[in-house]
Image (cartoon, grey):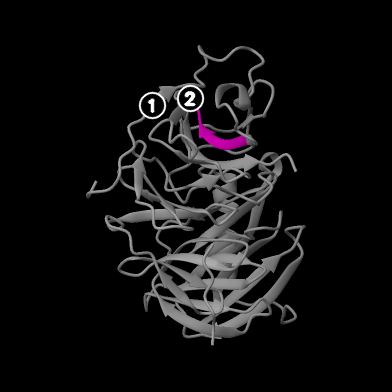
Amino acid sequence: MPRVVEDGLEAPTRKSDRLPWGWLLAGLLIGSGFSVLLFRVDVVSIPTETTFAGQENDIGPQQGIADVIVGFPDGLVATVRAGGRSLGILTWPLRGASYEEALPVGASTPSDPVAFDYSGQQMATLLPVPDQSLGVLYAGVPEIASIVALDVTGFAWHDSSPLDLAYTTFEGDELLLWVTRGPLADLELVARSVGIDGRIAAWGDWGFAVEDEEKGSIVLFTESGEIKDTHPGRVLASSADGWLAIDNDGISLLSAGGGVKGLDRPGLAGDILTGGLSADGAFLGLLTTDGILVVALDDDSELIQLGARPGVPQLTWSSDSRFVSYPGLRGIVVLDTVDWGVDEILETHIITGLGVLPLS
C-alpha cells in the first residue's frame, strides 16, 4: 500500500423526541412479523472461462468450499432468501458440506445488505421504517440477532476487530456516534457533533469516517471522537492500516491523517457501487453495475475488468487477499487474482449478505 507523508465521552442518558414513537413502532413491527432482509471503457479484460460450481447437483455430500474453489482459504457465510420470502443463513465450511439454518424472523422487504463482522460470526443490517428516513439497527449472532437501536442513520463493523460495531443516531440537531465493543448491550458514546447530516461509513483503530451526505463530504474522527479533518467524496472501503478508498469524481486513497493519493488508471470511472481493499494492501476491488474492477495498488499495471452483474452491492476479500467475492443476481461470483479465473457458486440461491469465516 502506498504511503503518504502527512504534514470518549461517557454515555449520558439517551433522550430523543423520536424515541417513544420508535419503540412503539418497533413493537408493532415485531408483533406483525416484520423483520430484516437477510435478504468497459478501454480496460484490460482478461479472457477467462467462467465456471458454474457449487450447485446442489454438482457438490458431493461432503465437499467443502476449498474442494470446489481450489485454494480458497476460509469458510463462507451468507444470508439467503429461500422459498417465498423466508430467510436463512448458509454456512459453507472449508472442508465439509454446506448447510442452511432458518433464522427466527419472518418475511421482509429489501433494505441494506446484511454485513458480517471481521470474524464472520455476527451480522448487522438496517431495517427501513415506513415514511421515515431513519432505520432500526438489527444485529448479533444470526440465530439470536435482535434490535440494537432505533433512529439509526448508519452502521459499520470495525475493519480489523471482531464483534465491534459502531453506529450513528440523531438527537435533536446533533449527530451521535456510538460504539459497542464485544457485547452489543455495552454502549459507549464516542462523539456528539452539530452540523453533520449523515452516517458512519467506516471504523478502525485509525478512527472513524462519517459521511456528511448533505455536504457530500467525509468527516474524519480520531478514535477518541475528535474531528481532525474533512474531505469531499464518498467512502467505498477502509483498511486496517488507515487507508480509505473514496469516490470524489474519480477514485482516490485517503489516509486517516488526511493525505490523499489519486489512482490514475485509464478506465477507472463510472458508477461505482461499493469497494473493498484486500488485507495485504495489494488490491482494490470496485463493484459496478456491470461487474468488478480490480486495481493493483503497488504498481501501475492496467485495470482488470471481469465478472457478472452484481445483486446486492457488497464485496468481500478472502483472508489471504487472493480471492474477492460478491453476490450475483443469483449465487456468488468468486474471482481468483492469481489466474483471473471466475467461478459462480450457489446459483440456486438469492444472496442478501456475504462474509468469510477465517480459520485464524
The answer to whether mark 1 and mark 2 are in CB contact below 8 A is no
Q: Secondary structure at mark 1?
A: loop
Residue 72 in view (yes/no): yes
Q: Residue at label 2? A: 83
Q: Position of residue 170 (x, y in %)?
A: 54, 75
Q: Residue drawn 59% across and 47% down?
A: 30
Q: Is residue 194 left or right of residue 138?
A: left
Residue 77 painted magenta: yes
- Give, as a single range, the part of the protein colored magenta: 76-82
- How many marks are shown on the rendered structure? 2
- The image position of residue 286, as x and y in percent, is 40, 52
Which corner quadrant holds the C terminus? Answer: top right
* Residue that label 1 marks: 50
| Residue density around tag 2, few if under 14, some if 14–19, many if 20 or more, within 10 Å | few
Residue 39 in view, yes or no: no
Q: Which of the two residues, 197 or 171, is positioned nearer the viewer here? A: 197
Residue at 48%, 25% (x, y): give it.
83
- Above or below residue 144? Residue 124 is below
Q: Is residue 26 left or right of residue 299?
A: right
User: Residue 193: x, y in percent?
Assistant: 55, 84
Q: Secondary structure at mark 2?
A: loop
Q: Is residue 250 left or right of residue 277?
A: left
Of callouts 1 and 2, the N-terminal one: 1
Give the foreground label among 1 and 2.
1
Give the residue type at disc 1: Thr
- Quadrant in which residue 168 is drawn: bottom right
Q: Which mark is residue 37?
A: none
